[in-house]
Amino acid sequence: MWTVLITGGSGFIGSHVARALIRVGYNVVIYDVVVNDKLIKDIRGNVAVVQGDVTDSALLAETVKKYGVNAIMHYAALLSAAAERNPYQGFKVNFEGTWNVFSIAKALGVKAIIFASSAAAYGLKAPEFVREDMYTVPETLYGISKQYGEMLGLWLCRRYNIGFAAFRYGS
């Protein structure tokens, strides 16, 4: 069975994804800068947990190697309001961190990446109902970073034959 590393895995979405993967038999590694024990207490015994930042490429690579990771689900991000308040930190986590995740996946032979994008990639003036093929005009650093992650992932997929999918979550 595959081992899946989930960046941001102790967050709201990541912890739910971890539960679903465990239910169907995957080995799960949660990699998060701040481990939220409240959200993962029921699965803590069934996952490996690494406290780490996606901007720390050495620890991220070490984790991928140590656990023999086959797939990465990249959910770690500095959310919109925080990225707007501190654009440098938003860049570090959302752009550099995404580059680290994707380049380490390529270098270490990870087979697939799932990227948590966002409806923020469409921009603030998007209609209530959107289609995947609609033109994106992100207006926040967070939205721009999500579009960047989608484009980088598609490039990796085409160039290096790494499986890639992005999900644009919305509220």
Image (cartoon, grey):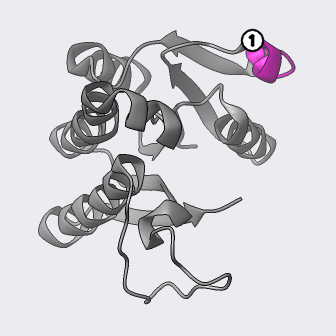
Along the line of sight, which residue is nearer the eye, 3 or 20? Answer: 20
- Picture quadrant where residue 88 is located: top left
Mark 1, residue position: 37
Q: Residues within 10 Å of mark 1 (few under 14, many from 20)?
A: few
Residue 42 sits above or below residue 7 on the image: above
**Residue 107 in the image: above or below residue 92:** below
Pick the quarter of the image with the N terminus. top right
The quarter of the picture where residue 91 lies is: top left
Q: Find the magenta span and give its range.
A: 37-45
Give above or below for 142 relative to 93: below
Q: Secondary structure at mark 1?
A: helix
Q: Please say whether residue 81 is one of the residues in the magenta stretch.
A: no
Quarter where residue 69 is shown: top left
Q: Is residue 39 located in the magenta-colored stretch of the structure?
A: yes
Left or right of residue 111, residue 95 in this image: left
Along the line of sight, the residue nearer the viewer: 41 or 77: 77
Q: x, y (%) of residue 29?
A: 55, 26
The amino acid on which the numbered mark 1 sits, given as a three-letter code, is Asp
Q: Residue 15 appears at what percent x and percent y?
A: 71, 33
